[in-house]
Amino acid sequence: MKHENLTWNAATREWFCKRCGRTSDNASVFEAQAELEQFECRLPSRETPSAAPGTETVRLIKKPFKMTPRVERSGCRFLVVETDHGPEIKLELLDDAPSLTSLSIGFEMLRGATLAQARTIVDAMNERIVGVIVTPK
Ligand SMILES: [Zn+2]
């Protein structure tokens, strides 16, 4: 088996190989493994020509495997939340950004910040910030 460490990525609903980064959107890990079996498990950047001079080598399709960056966009707004430690700013997503659905994102304020200050900031943010852009690094 070439890709032994397939891991399910719930955000993208794909299996991916931790070693080489190849992905398969088959729901079953067995089918995903079968699909990826046709590829060698190695990073394209590590591919070094190792054939001795004069040896005929089969040139594999030299398209370096690259994951197309998945860009997710969601409209958002900021809310002031009162907590025991003072006000916090919460990010509310208005659309579905799969990578973020399982996360709650908030912003902690400097100690001593008042509710009024938090509201002023949130108003300014909501006035100018329209959305969140999520891209894998
Ligand atoms: Zn692999």
Image: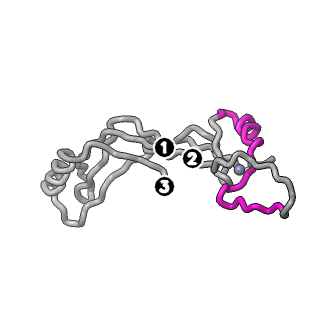
Evaluate if marks 1 and 3 touch, with contact meaning CB atoms under 8 Å apart. no
Location of mark 3 (residue): 137
Question: What amino acid is labelled 3 in the image?
Answer: Lys
Q: Is 108 placed left or right of 15 in the picture?
A: left
**Could you say which disc has been placed on residue 105 in the image?**
none
Foreground residue among 2 and 116: 2
- Contact (Cβ within 8 Å) of mark 2 with mark 1: yes
Disc 2: which residue: 67
Badge 3 or badge 2: first in the primary sequence: 2
Whether residue 104 sits left or right of residue 58 in the image: it is: left
| Magenta stretch bounds | 26-51
Placement of 53 over or under 81, stated as above or below:
below
- Residue 103 in picture, x, y percent from top left: 43, 46
> Which element type, helix, strand or loop, lies under badge 2?
loop
Distance from the alpha carbon under mark 1 to that under mark 3: 10 Å
Quarter assignment of residue 12: top right
Q: Can you identify the residue that label 1 sits on?
A: 70
Q: Is mark 3 within 8 Å of ligand 1?
A: no
Of residue 53 and residue 49, the one placed in the foreground of this image is 53
User: Mark 1: which secondary structure?
Assistant: loop
**Distance Cα–Cα, label 3 vs label 2:** 11 Å
Left or right relative to 43: residue 84: left
**Label pair 3/2, CB-CB below 8 angstroms:** no
Label 1 or label 3, whichever comes before in sequence order: 1
Q: Nearer the viewer, residue 134 or 27?
A: 134
Q: Which residue is located at x 16 percent, y 50 percent?
A: 124
**Given the image, on which type of amino acid does mark 1 rest?**
Arg
